[in-house]
Amino acid sequence: MATYSCRSREELRMEYKKLMNRYEALKHENLKLDMSRGKPSQLQLDLVSDMLTVLQNSKDCIIDGLDCRNYGDLAGLKCAREYWADVLGCKPSQTFVGGNASLSLMYDLIARAFTYGLKDSPRPWCKEERIKFLCPSPGYDRHFRITEKFGFELITVPMTPDGPDMDVVEQLVEDPMVKGIWCVPKFSNPQGYCYSEETVDRFANLKPAAPDFAIMWDNAYCVHEFDGEFQPFRDIISLCAEAGRPNMVYEFASSSKITFPGAGISVMAASEENIAYHSKLIGVQTISYDKVNQLRHVLYLKDRAHTLELMKKHAQILAPKFELVLKMLRAEVTDKGIAHWHHPQGGYFVCVAAMPGTAKRTLELCKKAGVTLTEAGATYPYGIDPHDSMIRIAPSLPPIEELEKAMQVFCTCLKLAALEKYLGITLESVTDEK
């Protein structure tokens, strides 16, 4: 069947009226479906709920002669640091284990850079006349909000299937006002791209003008395959050290989508110098994080190999949902020529690049039909998508039956928005004609 761009105006109007009838029928179903965030489903939470019984009594809270219920071990239990070092491929001495959210570790790092400066900072960032931060886009909205909150100038860097456009990155870091870059190197949020080996090498060998330039390496989906076998990743900390800039990178991860998002453990990995420097500053903020929870996680997850076995069980729940989303996009949208998308093998999102100028309208129509998705523009700095095109779908939370209904709504709305663009009409004008 011909794409929309190849059809006559009359054919487009007929298609539009047919879709409007379908849309009105979907609206009358009074749906309340949420695909706005990458939340694990109840099935995934139930999958790991036996972790709550790992610690049975007070004796279970003692390890290596330390009572985890008490103060101490600011950088995390020895076994917790060893666990994350095994997962990330770095050294235990290069890890700092925090609370349930890696986002908190990221925010606090930027706050400390702003207030005190980083290990190699000539002065605190708050003393700088101007600060710029690189934001590969589409990207993670919460990353962008952190640096926006501190008043940094956010600079968009185009994403490619191999990662950020490194030609652009290497040019921009020649400016000493550029202090860092946000990265999600594996199954990027939202497109699901994995940085190529060349991209990782170019990051490790960056020569930024700012001596305190920070690569914020958010490895949130490091073990989160749902299609195929585990894809190993390289240790960015060692690579930066080998390139002569050991303090340039900070890596983050958490168990948020391995165990419980609201009650997990997180990690910041960096050079020993960076860990020592930040531990002194964090020691003013807190005496220690939740070591009981750290122990619970280590006893349950054990090591990377055991964690990967658990992730295969998560994949059995997630894979059918992503397959459904991609199947419906192919069936409903492919031959219309109005959008394209990447087939991710892991992570938590499908990113649809809609016809320019239609993302906001698509999401507006979805909302009226009872389906909530991430706001248009959220995947760009300041919430502004220059092409009004990118739409992030989070399939993980709804049961498969609800997800199928939500995708029926989404595909219908995507096509309606595109037809409105071609025809120069609005939903209200067609409704009036009726």
Image (cartoon, rainbow, N blue to C red):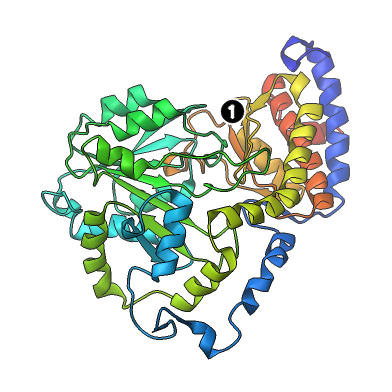
Name the residue rendered at 41%, 51% in the picture: 145
Q: Position of residue 363 (x, y in %)?
A: 66, 41
Amino acid type indicated by mark 1? Gly
Q: Quadrant of the N terminus?
A: top right
Residue placed furthest toward the left: 122
Name the residue rendered at 20%, 38% in the picture: 177
Q: Does residue 146 sit above or below 8 in this rendering? A: below
Other-residue count near label 1 (Cα within 10 Å), few / some / many at <14 / 14–19 / ≥20: some
Q: Quadrant of residue 344?
A: top right
Q: Position of residue 189 (x, y in %)?
A: 53, 42
Looking at the image, can residue 102 be seen? Answer: no
User: Which sits in the foreground, 197 or 64?
Assistant: 64
Q: In the shown orientation, is residue 180 left or right of residue 294? A: left
Q: Quadrant of residue 409?
A: top right
User: Which sits in the foreground, 282 or 299?
Assistant: 299
Name the residue rendered at 46%, 47% in the picture: 219
Q: Position of residue 281 (x, y in %)?
A: 23, 67
Q: Position of residue 55 (x, y in %)?
A: 58, 81
User: Which sits in the foreground, 420 or 255?
Assistant: 255
Q: In the shown orientation, is residue 271 left or right of residue 187? A: left
User: Which sits in the foreground, 400 or 29?
Assistant: 400
Looking at the image, can residue 121 be seen? Answer: yes
Please name the residue that numbered disc 1 is placed on: 357
Q: Does residue 234 sit above or below 276 in this rendering? A: above
Q: Quadrant of residue 389?
A: top right
